[in-house]
Image (spheres, helix red, strand yellow):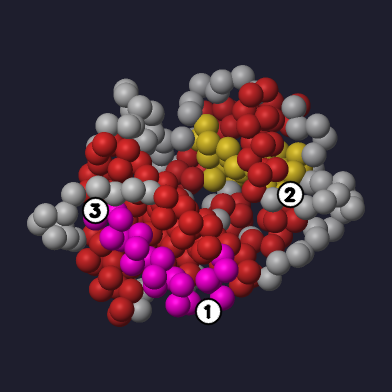
Amino acid sequence: MPASPRDMLVGQRIAAQIVAVGQGRVQRVVMIGSRARGTPRPESDLDLVVLVELPAGSPPWGPSETIAERKRIQQQVPAPPVVADLWVRTTDRYAEARHVIGGVEILVDTEGVNLYSRPPERAPVIRRTSDQVRRELVSAWVDHALSALDGTVAIESGRAPFPPVPGQPKTATEAARMCVERATTALLVLHQIGAGKGCDLLPLIGQLSDADRRRVADWFGAGQASETPSHRAHRVVTELLTTLSKAHGMRPHLSPCWARYKQIAVR
């Protein structure tokens, strides 16, 4: 089902605004997610991927540079009529990751709707293999799970902001489930099993190995009767990190995750 005419019009308007503040670097703006697929709910975000082309010979951008560019664009573009979520990627990173399940780059090709594009001015520079990108994406999903664990603890301890931030879990139980979903996604990305943003995990779980399938079934189950949501989320993250540390080549990518994990205090 194609994107609705209204979503196309809104998306093109936002894309034009992004290009206007893009300092000449924007090469493409692509809509992904449920609005691109024509299956949004009323509360669905408008998901946009902005591909920027750096001049030849420029140093590569890492996460800090892309996050900074995302913030800069969001500050300079007027508030859209729908909630918009923005990802910034360089054309080099897109070329590296476009065939790897787990990131937004592959969604540009599999479900993306072009809102703006211009011809590239140079060939992309490939610095990482697909396997290296896969490991980076796995560790990124682990970090997302850690954020959900931290949120679960914050809600239980009363540290979470009130009223809740829009789009964030309102209860510790919701936050713990988010942690489980992100931990499961990390395993799916490890094995390169997956689909688009917001896809149903249940049919994908059936494709995991027997050991992982049993583990995930336990994660989604009720757990021990005495478990609080934070204890459940903590157990899931512990099992995830332990499992991934045994996977080939993953240990170096998980060092920051282990460090963050040790800083989250669960009572």
Magenta segment, which residues? Answer: 231-253
Image position, residue 3 (x, y; %): 51, 40
**Residue drawn at point x = 67 percent, y = 37 percent:** 68
Amino acid at pointer 1: His
Q: Residue at x 48, y 26 (%)?
A: 82
- The circle drawn on residue 231 is 3
Whether residue 38 sits left or right of residue 213 in the image: it is: right
Question: Where in the figure is residue 205, as x and y percent of width and height?
Answer: 33, 68
Query: What label sits on residue 61 in the rendered view?
Result: 2
Is disc 3 in contact with disc 2, using a CB cutoff of under 8 Å?
no
Q: Secondary structure at mark 3?
A: helix
Q: Is residue 243 above or below residue 220?
A: below
- Asked if residue 134 can be seen in this view, the reply is no
The secondary element bearing badge 1 is classed as loop
Residues at marks 2 and 1 touching, judged by CB atoms closer than 8 Å? no
Q: Which residue is mark 1?
A: 248
The amino acid pointed to by label 2 is Trp
Magenta stretch containing residue 52, yes or no? no
**How many C-alpha atoms fall within 10 Å of the one at disc 1: few (<14), some, or many (≥20)?**
few
Q: Position of residue 159 (x, y in %)?
A: 32, 32
Query: Is 21 in front, or is 240?
Result: 240
- Give, as a three-letter code, the residue at label 3: His
